[in-house]
Image (tube, helix red, strand yellow):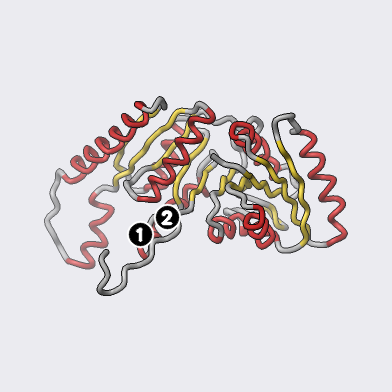
Amino acid sequence: MFRHLIVPLDGSREANVGVPHAYRIARGSGARVTLLRVVSHGRDVADGQAFLDGVAHEYAAPDLAIEVVVREGDAAEVILSEIQQRGADLVVMRTHGRSGLTRAVLGSVAEKIVKQSSTPVLLLPPGDRNQASGDIRAILVPVDGSPGGSLALGVAQALARQSNASLQLLQVVQPVPAYQSSALLMYGPMDVDPAWDADAESGAQAHVDAIASRLSARGLTARAEALIANSVPEAIVTNAAEHECDLIVMSSHAHTGAARAFLGSVTDAVVRSAKCPVLVVRREAERESQPGEAA
């Protein structure tokens, strides 16, 4: 599983919600933890060091390797550099970080880390009900048959084994009306099979049931659900809340072009509205096929 976790902290108590989650994962996998503080001026290094030393002391444990690092510079650039130099394989950080006034959206630093690093990022929202313990008891994994979804499921399986958590598999099917408006613009009026929605939902349920069956055969607790919804992100967030999931694991995108943009927007919307942490597993975009090449 994960071997080296980096936890960027900005000196605020709000940012510290990432520490229990990182420590829980690290102690289960034997990973090292680096607490990172980025400061704007060299005169702030001593204060940053004292802050990190206090956090490390609070969570110190014999079976946990903790390192504290203070760097000066641009927060996103420094974090990206430390990820690469240290070979970190997971970053744990709060979504709504502070930069002057509290940001109302993802936060520019977290957004840059997700977009520019291939390392998985565990994004934590304010008000996470398990922020004090970092417990993971139920994990939601949206599946869609894409390579990115398969990668996210693999990571979720490993975390489920490590934390003895259950897996909630969800496939969301958009109904015909969600496509009709754009299709009408492109092709004009057309006949639509009235049974399409029911058939699509039935096929999706069979797909997730098969995955859940294979996971159960491997000793994991897995539930499967397929549903029809106009908004994929809203369906994911609502389902996670209904099943009291402690974590959502999903890929940032699976393909290039329009497919990548769509899946990226789904992940972005889930991160911005979910009440539980979201682990974003980035899959490198597939190269577009060139003319004359096999797809």
Give the image location of residue 89, x and y in percent: 58, 48
Q: Residues within 10 Å of mark 1 (few under 14, many from 20)?
A: few
Q: Position of residue 107 (x, y in %)?
A: 61, 55
* Residue 140 drawn at (x, y percent): 44, 36
Q: Amino acid under label 2?
A: His
Separation of residues labelled 1 and 2 (CA atoms)? 8 Å
Residue behind mark 2:
253
Instruction: Point out the image quarter for the C terminus.
Output: bottom left
Q: Which residue lies at the image location 56% right of the left edge and 49% below the top edge?
A: 121
> Which corner quadrant holds the N terminus?
top right
Question: What kind of element bears circle 2?
Answer: loop
In this rendering, would 9 be left or right of 138? right
Q: Secondary structure at mark 1?
A: helix
Could you tell whether 283 is left or right of 109 in the image? left
* Mark 2 surroundings within 10 Å by alpha-carbon count, few (fewer than 14), some (14 through 19), many (20 or more): many
Which of these two is toward me, 147 or 138? 147
Task: Work out whether mark 1 precedes mark 2 in sequence or the reverse, and give the earlier one.
Answer: 2
Q: Is residue 247 left or right of residue 212?
A: right
Q: Nearer the viewer, residue 125 or 283?
A: 283
- Residue under label 1: 259
**Mark identifier at residue 245:** none
Report the front residue among 139 and 56: 56
The answer to whether 106 is drawn above or below residue 3 in the figure is below
Q: Residue at x 66, y 53 (%)?
A: 86
Can you give x and y, in whole percent of width and height, for residue 18 in the image? 65, 41
